[in-house]
Amino acid sequence: MSELYENLIEYANSDYYPFHMPGHKRKNINDISPYTYDITEIDGFDNLHEPQGIIRLALEEAKAFYESDKTYFLVNGSTCGLLSAICGVTSKKDKVIVARNCHKSVYNAIYLNELRPVYIYPENIEEFGINGGILPETVNKAIIENTDAKAVIITSPTYEGIVSDIDKLAEIVHRNNMILIVDEAHGAHFGMHMNLPKNALSNGADMVIQSVHKTLPALTQTALLHIKGDRVNKDRVENFLKIYQTSSPSYVLMSSITECINKIKKDGMFLFEPYVKRLLVVHKHANELTHIKLIGRDIVGKDGVYDFDLSKLVFSVKGTGYSGKWLYEKLLNDYHLQLEMASGDYVIAMTSVMDEEEGLLRLFKALAEIDRDIRIENYGIEDKNDLNYSYIVPKAIAIQSVYDAINSDKEYIPFNLSEGKVSAEYIYLYPPGVPMLAPGELITGDILALVSRYKKSGLNVYGLKDREFKNIEVVKEGFRAVNLVRGFYSQK
Ligand SMILES: Cc1ncc(COP(=O)(O)O)c(C=O)c1O
């Protein structure tokens, strides 16, 4: 047995409770072993890339369920949906308006089509040090200044469950003949209960990408790409889906999507009603905590937050002198509660309809104890000031396009001496996979300080080939100068 397999079995048999994706929470929604129905495109089983039979039928059902005009199954996650959606509506070197807090797959699409992004920034929720929503005014301004942009790409909800006003954004984007692409990877469950946000498709977005596996009972990698209206050239998008999706799509994954949809169609009310009730109880009791704060609906209506996803339990320790990583590890080691992520000063517990009362109760009891310990013992991290920072996406100073930076002459230099250089690499926390630095961007003192603080507090900082973060690959000075002289790229 490989160590990987052994560890999976050990985790499956342990008492660790999964507050992480996938949304099936390791519960079988049918009793067949995946090996039993893992086949390829044999007779009678249709073809995902040219669906004519049973897959076509399944796609029609998914389309009706999500009320789209066209729905595609994705077996390589939302990642391949975002790549196909963005490449499908742009040509090489086109301009796109992009929320800077998008997932790295959006940046990879920017790379692939050599796009020129104009970044827009979400508002900040100061109280919790997290990104708020994207304001319609922000999009409007970017469009007025960039009338030649082809599309606007935003993430809603964010990893933390922040929803922007898609209705208004769509109106502005369409008035200017552009296309609105919404990364709704964390919102496949939207619209399934009146206390959950409406989904972006019903609010007017042209293309919406959802990871079914994140928030619904479906297997990892399952996702959907929806198109609504006639602004998007479907043939082009389909062409890219054929490029970015495997030529051996898994029937295990495809049927996991269909069975997830069928289960919700059949039992939706019985699943979502008690689930939402349980979430509301958690939110109510969270008010009893003294130090740990659960982000709730009171953030709605300001900082660009149009709506908030209750299913994301975001617990903040901001201002307590403790870090998100500390809370995350305490929950993991002392209580066997595996959360989805830790950031500077908050943690995220992901929930789904498959969570039972017992799991939420365990989480709440643990938090109550930890909260009491914070008050009584007041121990923690020595350098408390160092924790007083947020995970708000930093302002980028783009000197070159992502494509040019990656394909330029490059050199390795010590990371701590790289201020003022142009990066040829990404740096991001994973999760959530939102770059704080992208290729082509200036490495500032703020970025260096942020990385050093994140690393010091034990967060997962990724991106550089040198995992130790001793060296970073930057664009060679001469190469950068030539490109600048040619006026290769300019960033608003
Ligand atoms: C906002 C966002 N978009 C897209 C993705 C990619 O989704 P997938 O893992 O389904 O490819 C993620 C993954 O975490 C994400 O958080």
Image: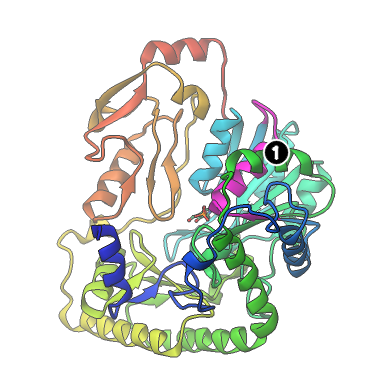
- Which image quarter: residue 45? bottom right
Asked if residue 326 is positioned above or below residue 80 in the image, the reply reads below
Total number of numbered discs in the rendering? 1
Q: Where is residue 216 in the image (x, y as percent from the top left)?
A: 56, 71
Around disc 1, counting alpha carbons within 10 Å, would you say few (fewer than 14), some (14 to 19), or many (20 or more)? some
Task: Locate residue 183 relative to residue 166 in the image: left or right.
Answer: left
Q: Position of residue 102 (x, y in %)?
A: 53, 48
What residue would you read off at disc 1?
A: 239
Task: Locate residue 319 relative to residue 108 in the image: left or right.
Answer: left
Q: Dividing the image into 4 quarters, which one contains the N terminus?
A: bottom left
Residue 122 is at least partly visible in this image: no
Asked if residue 35 is positioned above or below residue 468 in the image, the reply reads below
Mark 1 sits near ligand 1, with its Cβ under 8 Å away: no
- Which image quarter: residue 492? top right
Q: Which amino acid does label 1 sit on?
A: Asn
Residue 375 is at least partly visible in this image: yes
Q: Position of residue 149 (x, y in %)?
A: 71, 34
Is 88 a magenta residue? yes
The residue shown at (72%, 48%) is 180
Asked if residue 283 is positioned above or below residue 257 in the image, the reply reads below
Front residue (pair 217, 88): 217
The colour scheme used here is rainbow
Element at label 1: helix
Residue stretch in magenta = 72-94
The residue shown at (63%, 75%) is 196
Q: Position of residue 170 (x, y in %)?
A: 76, 53
The residue shown at (39%, 66%) is 340
